Image (cartoon, rainbow, N blue to C red):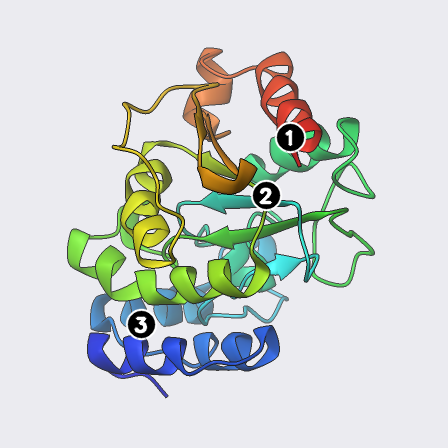
Amino acid sequence: MAGSGAEVAELARESRTLGELTARVSVCRACPRLVEWREDVADVKRKAFADETYWGRPIAGWGDDDPRVLIVGLAPAAHGGNRTGRVFTGDRSGDWLFASLYRTGLAAQPTSTYAGDGQRLLGARMVATVRCAPPANKPTVEERDTCLPWLRRELELVDPRVIVALGGFAWQALWPVLREAGYRPPRRPPFGHGVEVELPEGRHVLGCYHPSQQNTFTGRVTEIMLDGVFARAKALG
């Protein structure tokens, strides 16, 4: 069990399979503030989910074990992934995301509400930059950096052709991970929706506005905009 940043780095580096990495992620306790928050939320619960048992632990990546497309988000939602045990499953952002993935052929169903609902990602995989739900959906820089070895090792194990970064937080966190994983990225350009960066050996990174409620309610991101990025990711993959 990882209880510090140094232990996260060691356990991530020594994980030989996705199964081993998933098991180690799921019991991580390296960030005291995040541990306290995720467990308090799981204990108190939201009234609408009062009869459910919350996951209340770190969220591992899920989807295809050999994906062409890797989708990188910010962190699990307190009453979404922290409840269901699967990132983007059971929250409003996920409603938009899965609908777009379904329309573009990267998901088997247009919705995902719980971990055993039959949803499958098709040639795609999802991960969170920070694996625990953070207060106000805002991890600290220290928490982000402590968690990054999990992302780096997952990236090394699945070796996708295309990476889609949902939001500026994921975009910024991704670049040092790419360098450490041997992807030899160019200097990081400014984040933007539809920004496309070509990496060596025909790999690509795409920027995509996060389908948060704030972005979808204000029209900053639309269905057409999401579909455009994921259709492009599928074509590149």
Q: Which type of secondary structure does the marked residue at label 1 adopt?
A: helix
Q: Residue at x 33, y 32 (%)?
A: 168
- Frontmost of labels 2 and 3 is 2
Observer able to see residue 39: yes
Query: Is 177 placed above or below 36 here?
Result: above
Relative to 45, is 63 on the left or the right?
Answer: right
Relative to 237, is 146 on the left or the right?
Answer: left
Residue 53, horizontal then vertical, whole percent = 59, 71
What is the C-alpha distance between the residues marked 2 and 3? 33 Å
Residue 33, horizontal then vertical, whole percent = 22, 67
Q: Amino acid at mark 2?
A: Arg
First reached walking from the N terminus: tag 1 or tag 2: 2
Question: Circle 1 sits on which residue?
Answer: 236
What is the C-alpha distance between the residues marked 1 and 2? 8 Å
Contact check, label 1 and label 2, Cβ < 8 Å: yes
Observer able to see residue 4: no
Question: Circle 3 sits on which residue?
Answer: 35
Quarter of image, res 28: bottom left
Relative to 127, is 74 on the left or the right?
Answer: left
Q: Amino acid at mark 1?
A: Leu
Q: Amino acid at mark 3?
A: Val
Q: Quadrant of the C terminus?
A: top right
- All told, the count of numbered labels is 3
Q: How many C-alpha atoms fall within 10 Å of the one at disc 2: few (<14), some, or many (≥20)?
A: some
Which of these two is toward me, 228 or 116? 228
Quarter of image, res 118: bottom right
The disc at residue 161 is 2
Q: Residue at x 39, y 61 (%)?
A: 152
